[in-house]
């Protein structure tokens, strides 16, 4: 016959064993979680390594690539002196980090390849954002919007936005982005306006100044160039399109790009970026 006392003790012993095993499994699971956390931290540390930033800090040299043929953003004189908005941005980065800035002049089409070949650390060269490059490169926030804008005569107070061009005449460069944009906006908005398309950009601004056109649509860089010549023109309304100019670094330089982004954000907040834009544009 079964011992009645042992029969009653068996469930409690079984529960004790299960409880012991449960604690063991819990301890094992906790240990695995700790190991996983440490492993993730180590992997994160490896991924966060930035040899480019480490070299800049060690050698005290920042190498900046640009195509110095696009004033007022970048140009170089016969004696090799660089100047322009992008040059000032790079110089401010060097001052901020306490390093020397060395400029490398490369044709615009070769900038990306030269960056990937480690010819320099950053591209600062009126560089439009290119989402097709985001797998291999890191981009900063925009520091200038070079999109299409609306330019009018300074004494014409009737026009405040593109919508005010109903029944008016708009000058554009023939076949340009501005030409296509004005046609599309007029069609989409159901507006009736006359488009004067000229082969040469100088002809378009001449039409505006002569009163033969009520407005001119062009990119923002060109608009600023026209306004530098005389004070009889002004911009109205927000940009009609966005073409952000950005700074680029290789994908393996995340800390460097973080530092660039932090600098641009601070300069936008404290007014330094606006000061440089006014100086050159």
Image: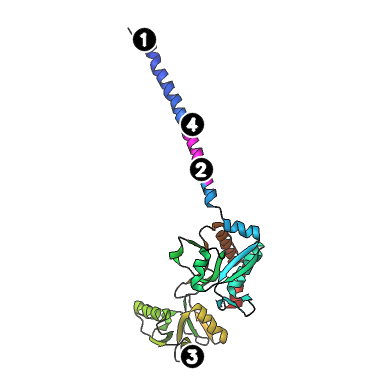
Residue identifier under label 1: 4
Q: Secondary structure at mark 1?
A: helix
- Identified at 49% across, 82% down, the residue is 151
- Viewport quadrant of the N terminus: top left
Name the dominant secondary structure of the magenta segment.
helix
Establish if 263 lies above or below 212: above
What segment is highlighted magenta in the picture?
29-42
Question: Disc 2 or 4, which lies upstream in sequence?
Answer: 4
Question: Disc 1 or 3, which lies upstream in sequence?
Answer: 1
| Residue 267 colored in magenta in the image | no
Nearest to the eye among marks 1 and 4: give it: 4
Instruction: Work out how far the residue at label 1 is from the one at label 2, CA to CA, in angstroms.
Output: 53 Å
Establish if 38 lies above or below 19: below
Residue 274 visible somewhere in the drawing: no
Position of residue 189 measured from the top left corner of the image (x, y, whole percent): 36, 77
- Identified at 65% across, 78% down, the residue is 79
| Residue 33 colored in magenta in the image | yes
* Colour setup of the view: rainbow
In the picture, the disc for residue 206 is 3
Instruction: Work out how far the residue at label 3 is from the one at label 2, CA to CA, in angstroms.
Output: 66 Å
Position of residue 146 measured from the top left corner of the image (x, y, whole percent): 50, 74
Residue 91 visible somewhere in the drawing: yes
Residue identifier under label 4: 27
Q: Secondary structure at mark 3?
A: helix
Q: Secondary structure at mark 2?
A: helix
């Amino acid at each position: 016959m079964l011992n009645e006392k042992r029969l009653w003790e068996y469930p409690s012993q079984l529960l004790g064993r299960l409880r012991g095993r449960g604690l063991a499994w819990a301890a094992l699971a906790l240990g695995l979680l700790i190991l996983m956390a440490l492993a993730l931290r180590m992997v994160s540390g490896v991924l966060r390594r930035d040899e480019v930033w480490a070299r800049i800090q060690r050698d005290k040299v920042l190498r900046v690539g640009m195509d110095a043929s696009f004033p007022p953003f970048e140009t170089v004189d016969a004696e090799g002196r660089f100047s322009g908005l992008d040059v000032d941005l790079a110089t401010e980065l060097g001052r901020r980090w306490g390093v020397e800035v060395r400029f490398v002049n490369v044709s615009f089409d070769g900038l990306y390849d030269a960056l990937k070949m480690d010819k320099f650390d950053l591209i600062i060269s009126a560089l439009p954002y290119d989402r097709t490059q985001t797998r291999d490169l890191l981009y900063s926030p925009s520091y200038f919007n070079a999109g299409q804008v609306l330019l009018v005569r300074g004494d014409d107070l009737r026009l405040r936005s593109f919508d005010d061009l109903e029944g008016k005449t708009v000058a554009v460069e023939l076949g340009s982005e501005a030409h296509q944009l004005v046609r599309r906006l007029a069609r989409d908005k159901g507006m009736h306006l006359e488009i004067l398309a000229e082969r040469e950009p100088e002809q378009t601004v001449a039409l505006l100044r002569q009163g033969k056109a009520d407005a001119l649509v062009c990119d923002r860089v060109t608009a600023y160039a026209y306004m530098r010549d005389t004070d009889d023109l002004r911009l109205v309304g927000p940009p009609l399109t966005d073409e952000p100019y950005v700074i680029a670094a290789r994908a393996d330089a995340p800390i460097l790009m973080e530092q660039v982004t932090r600098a641009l954000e601070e300069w936008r907040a404290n007014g330094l970026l606006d000061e440089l834009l006014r100086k050159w544009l």
